[in-house]
């Protein structure tokens, strides 16, 4: 029997609570109990004083003696419809947004302000109009998040004394107030785009000119460096060639001196170096010159070119100066050689060598 009563008691209790709180027609049946839903908080006043906080669940409420105020402590939002305003550059616009807030202190929200939701909406409307006036039209179009952040801070500072926190503010729409203003803004933006385009074109031309200038400078510096290197190379080449010719001349003179010395030693009675006189060296030099001349004659004789060569003092211009530079000098020499019969002619191949014996 006791177990049956224990099983039916919760059901009967629930039915009793439902009957006490169930409305009948247009009149609400008076009840001594009330239910606070999850996510809500209530404050109960006894004859208008002694506030008591009611938590979610079943609570006692005596009619005529208790007054109950229930608040939603969840995050909520209020919509701000198309609000006319002016930007910092005096552009009339229409702006709408959503204000999200949450009640942190239900006591202040209940007793520090009346109709907290309506007042939060009023604060959001006035703050939106004032903050919008500190931004230009281009700034709002370029970065709407900056406007949202400033609105969040401004509204949050205003409603913090009510125990309400502004979680965020989102601007939903932002547009000019009428078509004429929109057309003017389009013309202004087009002009701004053209101005930026001209600036970019000018900067591009400046960059091209600067690049050409640098190219010409670098090319001239390169040419200068190349000319300098070429001049240094020529100088070094000439200097080395001069040194080579100098060494060659020294070596040839040394070789010639050695040849003269050897010939003079062979012409001397004895091979002793001390017995070689200047006459011996002079005779050796003349002998060496004759040997060189014979080598030249041999080379001319072996040549197959059709040319005539003249030798002797008269051919070298050691005779009369007027005869040496006469136009008919060669003919005169030939005639003289053939008439006197004192010339010896040798012909090998197509070359003719004529020597005069004086």
Image: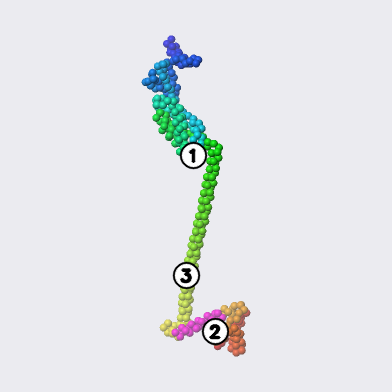
Q: CA distance from mark 2 to mark 1?
A: 112 Å
How far is mark 1 from mark 3, CA to CA?
84 Å
User: Residue 347 location in percent, x, y?
Assistant: 61, 82
Q: Position of residue 25 (x, y in %)?
A: 50, 15
Q: Residue at x 59, y 80 (%)?
A: 301
Q: Is residue 60 visible?
A: no
- Dot 2: within a 10 Å radius of its alpha carbon, few (fewer than 14), some, or many (20 or more) residues? few
On screen, 54 above or below 131? above
Residue plotted at (53% across, 39% down)? 181
Residue furthest out toward the bottom:
340
| Vertical relation: 172 (above or below) 21 | below
Q: Which mark is residue 90?
A: 1
- Residue 178 coordinates in the image, percent (x, y): 54, 36
Q: Quadrant of the C terminus?
A: bottom right
Q: Residue at x 60, y 86 (%)?
A: 332
Label 3: state its secondary structure. Answer: helix
Q: Earlier in the sequence, mark 1 or mark 3?
A: 1
Tag nearer the camera, 1 or 3: 1
Label pair 2/1, CB-CB below 8 angstroms: no
Q: Is residue 319 magenta?
A: no
Secondary structure under the numbered disc 1 in the rendered image:
loop
Which label's residue is closer to the chain start, 2 or 1? 1
Magenta span: chief secondary structure: helix
Whether 286 is among the magenta residues is yes
Q: Residues within 10 Å of mark 1 (few under 14, many from 20)?
A: few
> In this figure, which colouring scheme has been used for the structure?
rainbow
Q: Give the Cα separation between the discs numbered 2 and 3.
A: 37 Å
Q: Position of residue 174 (x, y in %)?
A: 51, 36
Residue position for label 2: 317
Residue bearing the label numbered 3: 239
Circle count: 3
Region rendered in magenta: 278-297
């Amino acid at each position: 029997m006791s177990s049956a009563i224990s099983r039916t008691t919760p059901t009967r209790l629930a039915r009793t609570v439902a009957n006490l709180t169930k409305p009948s027609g247009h009149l609400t049946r008076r009840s001594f109990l009330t239910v606070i839903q999850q996510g809500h908080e209530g404050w109960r006043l006894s004859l208008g004083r002694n506030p008591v906080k009611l938590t979610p669940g079943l609570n006692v409420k005596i009619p005529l003696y208790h007054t109950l105020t229930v608040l939603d402590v969840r995050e909520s939002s209020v919509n701000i419809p198309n609000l006319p305003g002016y930007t910092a550059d005096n552009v009339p616009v229409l702006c709408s947004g959503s204000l999200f807030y949450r009640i942190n202190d239900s006591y202040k929200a209940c007793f520090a302000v009346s109709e907290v939701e309506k007042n939060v909406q009023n604060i959001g409307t006035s703050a939106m109009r004032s903050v919008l006036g500190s931004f230009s039209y281009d700034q709002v179009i370029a970065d709407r998040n900056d406007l949202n952040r400033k609105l969040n801070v401004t509204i949050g500072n205003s409603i913090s004394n009510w125990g309400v926190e502004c979680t965020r503010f989102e601007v939903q729409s932002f547009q000019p107030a009428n078509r004429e203003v929109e057309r003017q803004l389009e013309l202004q933006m087009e002009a701004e785009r053209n101005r930026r385009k001209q600036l970019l074109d000018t900067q591009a031309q400046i960059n091209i000119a600067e690049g050409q200038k640098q190219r010409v400078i670098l090319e001239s510096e390169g040419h200068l460096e190349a000319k300098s290197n070429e001049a240094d190379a020529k100088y070094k080449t000439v200097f080395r060639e001069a040194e080579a010719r100098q060494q060659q001349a020294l070596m040839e003179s040394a070789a010639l001196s050695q040849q003269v010395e050897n010939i003079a030693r062979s012409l001397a009675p004895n091979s002793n170096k001390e017995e070689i006189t200047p006459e011996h060296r002079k005779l050796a030099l003349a002998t060496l010159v004759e040997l060189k001349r014979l080598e030249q004659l041999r080379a001319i004789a072996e040549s197959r070119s059709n040319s005539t060569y003249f030798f002797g003092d008269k051919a070298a211009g050691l005779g009369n100066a007027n005869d040496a530079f006469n136009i008919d000098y060669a003919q005169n020499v030939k005639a003289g050689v053939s008439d006197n019969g004192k010339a010896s002619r040798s012909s090998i191949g197509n070359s003719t060598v004529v020597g005069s014996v004086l």
